[in-house]
Image (tube, rainbow, N blue to C red):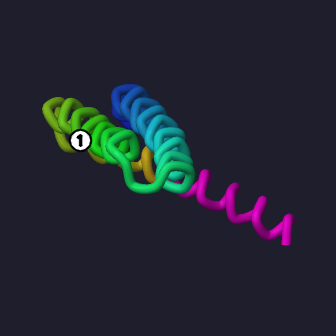
Amino acid sequence: MISLIFMQTFPYGLLGALIGIAYVSALGWNVRLYVGHGVGWGGLLVHGLRLLMVAAGFTLCARQGALPLLSSLVGFVVTRTWAVNQKRRILEAES
């Protein structure tokens, strides 16, 4: 029973991780746009698209049920946390 639940939710966890990777990558691009060019339409457009992408991904998972939504959220949070910790280690090593 547990292995069946795991096999049904694991793909949604991977999807959440992929959403997290895309979110963090777009966040890096967004920061470069804001820092390099000030607050312009390009930065605002990327920011809006980044939020819409996450909302659309989680909405699709929510339509499948609570367990897929929670699984994808866990994948997203784990990926985001890993990216933040990785960046913090890089900044600490540079200083």
Residue at the image position 47 percent from the left and 35 percent from the top: 22
Q: Position of residue 87 (x, y in %)?
A: 68, 58
User: Along the horizontal axis of the image, is 23 left or right of 62?
Assistant: right
Q: Does residue 49 show up? A: yes
Amino acid type, residue under disc 1 in the picture:
Ala
Q: Is residue 56 magenta?
A: no
User: Along the horizontal axis of the image, is 58 left or right of 4?
Assistant: left
Where is mark 1, residue-wise?
A: 55
Q: Which quadrant holds the N terminus?
A: top left
- Which residue is the extreme one toward the left? 63
Main SS of the magenta part reads helix
**Above or below: residue 82 compared with residue 61:** below
**Above or below: residue 4 compared with residue 67:** above
Query: Is 94 or 38 nearer to us in this picture?
Result: 38
Query: Is 40 or 77 nearer to us in this picture?
Result: 40
- What crowding class fits label 1: few (fewer than 14 Cα within 10 Å), some (14-19), or many (20 or more)? few
Residue at the image position 44 percent from the left and 42 percent from the top: 23
Q: Position of residue 49 (x, y in %)?
A: 30, 37
Q: Is residue 83 magenta?
A: yes
User: Along the horizontal axis of the image, is 65 left or right of 72?
Assistant: left
Query: Is 83 or 45 nearer to us in this picture?
Result: 45
Give the magenta part as a residue range: 79-95
User: Along the horizontal axis of the image, is 93 left or right of 49?
Assistant: right
Quarter of the view holding residue 66: top left
